[in-house]
Amino acid sequence: MLLAVVTGAIALFAGLIFFHAGYSKFRHSADYIDIMAAYLGRPVKSWTVTTVGTTEMVLALALLVPATRSIAAFGCSFLLVMYAGFMWRQIQVGRKDLRCGCSGPAAETRIGPELVLRNLLVAAPLLGVAAQPPSLNSMVIISLGTALGLFLVLIYLSTDQIIANRQRLVGWSQ
């Protein structure tokens, strides 16, 4: 029962994060063109940003369906590791001024080692979710998983704010 609650919580948590990220890219694609171009090191069209956003939203919704949860969890984990790699590459060449883009186009968070670590820490349990066989759960398991998933979202958002505040205080983006 505990494994089913934790698996459901991680799926809901990642689903909410990915849906928000995808919806932001889908709705505000023009705001992400420069961010994505900087990460990739080449020009990016608006349709590319929209495609990435749509992919994130589809993966988010697929995480909530037991039959597609495993493949969606693997896809989300892959994207998080890929994003961490893009960030790390930019950090290595000294581009610490780049906005993350993780929490929406207006977020002030800049890329840094803590965001790379955060992406990897979120990607790891998603691999565990991907390894679980699909199952339908009782209302108790779904309720507990939902509560824990929402709690994880609050921790994620709080961590994001702590990172942004630390960057402002330390002057990471300078």
Image (cartoon, rainbow, N blue to C red):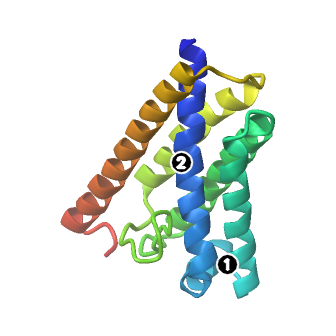
106 shown above or below 169: below
The residue where tag 1 is placed is 41
103 shown above or below 38: above
Q: Is residue 43 visible?
A: no
Q: Residue at x 47, y 76 (%)?
A: 105
Whole-angstrom CA distance, mark 1 to mark 2, is: 21 Å
168 shown above or below 132: below
2 shown above or below 119: above
Q: Residue at x 42, y 38 (%)?
A: 152
Q: Residue at x 53, y 61 (%)?
A: 20
Residue 144 location in percent, x, y? 47, 25
The residue where tag 2 is placed is 119
Extreme-top residue of the structure: 1
**Crowdedness of circle 1 by 10 Å Cα count: few (<14), some, many (20+)?**
few
Q: Nearer the viewer, residue 130 or 134?
A: 134
Q: Nearer the viewer, mark 1 or mark 2?
A: 2
Which residue type does callout 1 highlight? Gly
Residue 56 location in percent, x, y? 68, 59
Q: Residue at x 55, y 27 (%)?
A: 142
Which residue type does callout 2 highlight? Asn
Q: Quadrant of the N terminus?
A: top right
Q: Is residue 158 visible?
A: yes
53 lies left or right of 24 = right
Element assignment for label 1: loop
The quadrant in which residue 77 appears is top right
